[in-house]
DNA sequence: CATCCACCGGAAATGTTGGGAC
DNA sequence: GTCCCAACATTTCCGGTGGATG
């Protein structure tokens, strides 16, 4: 064991997808969540919080604690971004049967409704903004009127997405979700999480407190903070110091982007690359026209088939929802209709 | 005040895949 | 197999936007 040069004894606790068994400073929220999923007092709910505040982990943790009296269903809307794909997930969760495309949604709704009368279901629609953006709110509308005692919905989204504005009125009133807000962690809390995860993952005394403090003073996003620590730990053979952490900042951000884009296409990656290059080369601001042009040049240099600008426009919206870029919309003016784009590297 | 910029973004079209009924 | 229906990714089409410019 001591011959292993790596600092990492158990990789799992450092990985962002690992649901922790304990949370720092979230006992109020956990209590509220318990009420929201309790069959006695349950209702639909929406969880709102910035990226990396623990929305997903809190709900999944709650799912683990539920007795077998309820079917739980996790729907990652980044991947399940249409009514049908989300329904498919739900169908599989309640029937334990795989299905492919070609079925009528009305059939699926009916069968799900029948199944949930036998056993209630709790559906977690994570990153709901991607489904809304791509396919509208018909899924939420239909589910919110289905068997309301037996089927409860939990949505998770960032504060930039206001369900009341994004949903049709009839959908919102039929859903009338209870709101649970997650405040971002401050530097001290981020540090506590990093300390806890380091202790569970790394060899004793392999990390300087200063290193963790530095990460925590740079970002409130736990997903990024953990990725950063993990990236540094993988590259370090001896103690993780503040200098090591500073040195790997850019690499860590790259790893974070890779993680965020895992569910997306190579075109998303090329778009990010185009934006990075343009930012390094010239003076801001960057407009969409230049980005599309650079994207086409990049596609050609990699001998890949480019997609249309209309499609890229949608992909840019994805990057914005992921908070990898910030967009300022100009609906006309000197430059015509366009978007001013900025990468989020400095603001994360 | 007319005209222009140049992409936004809704909607329809296209082409492909798969299910179920006959 | 044939026919019709639905889902889906992507393209094609195009009306619309508001500040600068003359």
Image: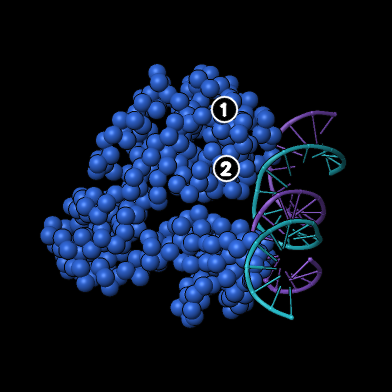
Chain colours: A blue, B purple, C cyan
The kind of secondary structure element at disc 1 is: helix
| Residue lying at 25% horizontally and 60% vertically, measured from the top left | A217
CA distance separating discs 2 and 1? 14 Å
Q: Is residue A321 visible?
A: yes
Give the vertical position of A40 relative to C21 (above or below): above
Q: Chain of mark 2?
A: A
Give the vertical position of A52 relative to A105 (above or below): below
Q: Quadrant of residue A49?
A: top left
First in residue order: circle 2 vs circle 1: 2
Q: Where in the figure is residue A317, as x and y percent of width and height? A: 56, 57
Residue in the foreground of this view, choosing between A305 and A260: A260
Numbered circle sitting on residue A166: 2
Residue where numbered disc 1 is placed: A174
Q: Is residue A48 left or right of residue A317?
A: left
The kind of secondary structure element at disc 2 is: helix
Q: Are marks 2 and 1 in contact (CB under 8 Å)?
A: no
Q: Where in the figure is residue A241, as x and y percent of width and height? A: 18, 68
């Amino acid at each position: 064991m001591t011959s292993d040069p790596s600092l990492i004894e158990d990789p799992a606790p450092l990985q962002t997808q690992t649901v922790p068994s304990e949370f720092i400073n979230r006992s109020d929220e956990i209590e509220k969540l318990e009420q929201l999923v309790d069959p006695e007092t349950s209702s639909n709910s929406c969880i709102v919080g910035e990226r990396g505040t623990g929305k997903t982990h809190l709900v999944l943790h709650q799912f683990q604690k539920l007795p077998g009296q309820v079917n739980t269903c996790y729907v990652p809307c980044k991947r399940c971004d249409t009514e049908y794909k989300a329904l498919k997930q739900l169908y599989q969760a309640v029937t334990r049967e795989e299905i492919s495309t070609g079925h009528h949604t009305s059939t699926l709704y009916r069968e799900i409704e029948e199944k949930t009368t036998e056993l209630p279901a709790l559906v977690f629609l994570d990153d709901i903004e991607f489904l809304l953006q791509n396919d509208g709110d018909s899924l939420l509308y239909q589910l919110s009127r289905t068997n309301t005692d037996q089927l409860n919905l939990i949505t998770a989204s960032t504060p930039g997405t206001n369900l009341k504005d994004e949903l049709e009125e009839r959908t919102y009133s039929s859903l009338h979700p209870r709101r649970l807000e997650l405040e971002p962690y401050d530097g001290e809390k981020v540090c506590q999480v990093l300390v806890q995860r380091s202790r569970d993952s790394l060899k004793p005394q392999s990390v300087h407190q200063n290193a963790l403090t530095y990460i925590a003073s740079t970002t409130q996003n736990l997903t990024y903070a953990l990725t950063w620590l993990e990236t540094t730990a993988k590259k370090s053979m001896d103690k993780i110091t503040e200098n090591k952490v500073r040195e790997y900042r850019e690499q860590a951000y790259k790893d974070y982007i890779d993680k965020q884009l895992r569910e997306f296409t190579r075109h998303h990656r090329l778009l990010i690359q185009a934006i990075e290059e343009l930012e390094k080369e010239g003076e801001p601001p960057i407009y969409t026209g230049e980005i599309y042009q650079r994207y086409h040049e990049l596609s050609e240099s990699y001998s890949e088939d480019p997609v249309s600008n209309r499609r890229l426009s949608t992909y840019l919206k994805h990057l914005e929802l992921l908070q990898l870029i910030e967009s300022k919309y100009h609906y006309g003016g000197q430059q015509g209709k366009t978007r001013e784009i900025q990468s989020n590297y400095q603001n994360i």
